[in-house]
């Protein structure tokens, strides 16, 4: 599932060509993946037909496409969602599951932005304005993981009895961290994923906040993790998976001490950690 580094990679791959582009037409092939603003019927206009794209914004794992005219879209990639930018959909290696197509006039010529999502856990939500989007769809999200601050994290974890793994996966505490970067951050912070989140001291909270920021920053530098389907808007794969220290490495030697890494279920997710290095 795309986490913050993957969605940021998509945003960066779209940004230069989408900003300033005019949406000539929108083709909706699967209306059920699109949600109009409350009380409004879904039309191509609600999906930015006729508008000009002013900017893209990411918060956690979600992306916003904001028009100059005001209306905005939130795009969530879910499990298998992709935003692809192509000259022609005929050039796509897998031209199936293309749910929404935005025909764009860009400075570099006509392009098509495609929302493709085989498993359809993702979707597109339309809003009258970016403010409406932030106030509703993003209201429950915590701060973006890239800038996670230690004092905030300490405040949010104080008094909680959940495991650290469960707390990091909670998008209301920190937006953007999923299973991959939670395991990577906890290893960096030398903290056990099963540790009681409320038991962290000041220094441990600082270590964890720094580790979350570092794990996400490395994921962005490596342009996301392409474990299965993930590609950026130009169908390029990322290399984050080549640098994982623990994720997906249960039973293999710890990169720090050499002991076999453990693997087990925690917060309903497969979790990998080092029993020697992480406490
Ligand atoms: Zn170790």
Image: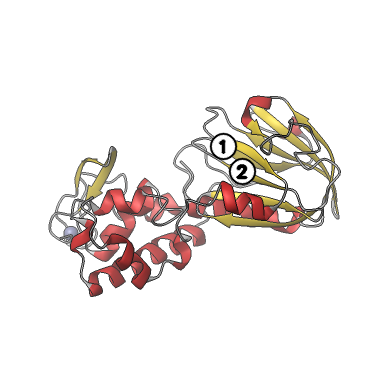
Q: Position of residue 212 (x, y in %)?
A: 37, 62
Q: Which residue is mark 1?
A: 81
What residue appears at the point 48 percent right and 60 percent down from the top-left corner? 144
**Horizontally, is 216 left or right of 236 in the view?**
left
Q: Is residue 80 above or below residue 108?
A: above
Number of labels in the image equals 2
Q: Name the foreground residue: 194 vs 232.
A: 194
Residue appearing at x 23%, y 53% in the figure:
193
C-alpha distance separating marks 1 and 2: 9 Å
Residue at 21%, 43% in the rendered image = 263
In the image: residue 24, left or right of residue 8: right
Q: Is residue 106 above or below residue 159?
A: above
Identify the residue position indicated by label 2 in the image.
Answer: 75
Q: Does the rendering let one see residue 136? A: yes
Is the residue marked by circle 2 packed among few (<14), some (14-19), or many (20+) residues within 10 Å? many
Residue 234 position, x and y percent, is: 66, 46
Instruction: Quarter of the image for the C terminus: give it.
Output: bottom left
Which residue is farthest front? 39
Lower position in the chain sequence, tag 1 or tag 2: 2
Say the numbered circle drawn on residue 11.
none
Where 143 sits versus 261, above or below? below
190, 91: nearer the viewer = 190
Q: Secondary structure at mark 1?
A: loop
Scheme of image coloration: secondary structure
Residue drawn where x is 27% and y is 46% of the image: 249
Instruction: For the residues labelled 1 and 2, say whether their Cβ atoms are less than 8 Å apart.
Output: yes
Query: How dense is the environment of label 1, judged by Cα within 10 Å: few (below 14), some, or many (20 and up)?
Result: many
- In the foreground, 251 or 69: 69
| Whether residue 238 is visible | no
Say which of marks 1 and 2 sits in front.
2
Image coords of residue 109 (percent x, y): 87, 49
């Amino acid at each position: 599932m795309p986490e913050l580094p993957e969605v940021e990679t998509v945003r960066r791959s779209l940004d230069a060509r989408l900003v300033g582009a005019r949406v000539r037409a929108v083709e909706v092939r699967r209306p059920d993946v699109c949600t109009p603003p409350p009380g409004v019927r879904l039309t191509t206009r609600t999906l930015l037909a006729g508008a000009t794209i002013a900017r893209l914004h990411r918060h956690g794992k979600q992306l916003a496409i904001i028009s100059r005219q005001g209306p905005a879209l939130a795009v969530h990639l879910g499990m298998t969602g992709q935003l692809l930018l192509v000259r022609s959909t005929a050039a796509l290696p897998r031209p199936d599951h293309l749910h929404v197509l935005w025909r764009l006039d860009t400075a570099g010529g006509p392009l098509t932005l495609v929302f493709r999502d085989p498993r359809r856990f993702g979707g597109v939500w339309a809003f009258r304005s970016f403010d409406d989007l932030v106030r509703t769809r993003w209201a429950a999200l915590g701060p973006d993981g890239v800038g996670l601050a230690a004092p905030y994290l300490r405040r949010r974890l104080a008094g909680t009895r959940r495991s650290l793994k469960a707390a990091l996966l909670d998008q209301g505490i920190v937006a953007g961290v999923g299973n991959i970067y939670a395991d990577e951050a906890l290893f960096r912070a030398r903290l056990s994923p099963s540790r009681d989140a409320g038991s962290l001291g000041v220094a441990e909270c600082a270590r964890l906040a720094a580790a979350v920021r570092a794990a996400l920053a490395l994921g962005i530098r490596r342009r996301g993790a392409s474990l299965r389907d993930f590609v950026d808007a130009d169908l390029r794969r990322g290399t984050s998976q080549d640098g994982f220290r623990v994720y997906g490495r249960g039973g293999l030697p710890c990169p720090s001490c050499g002991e076999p890494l453990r693997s087990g279920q925690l917060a309903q997710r497969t979790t990998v950690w080092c029993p020697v290095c992480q406490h």
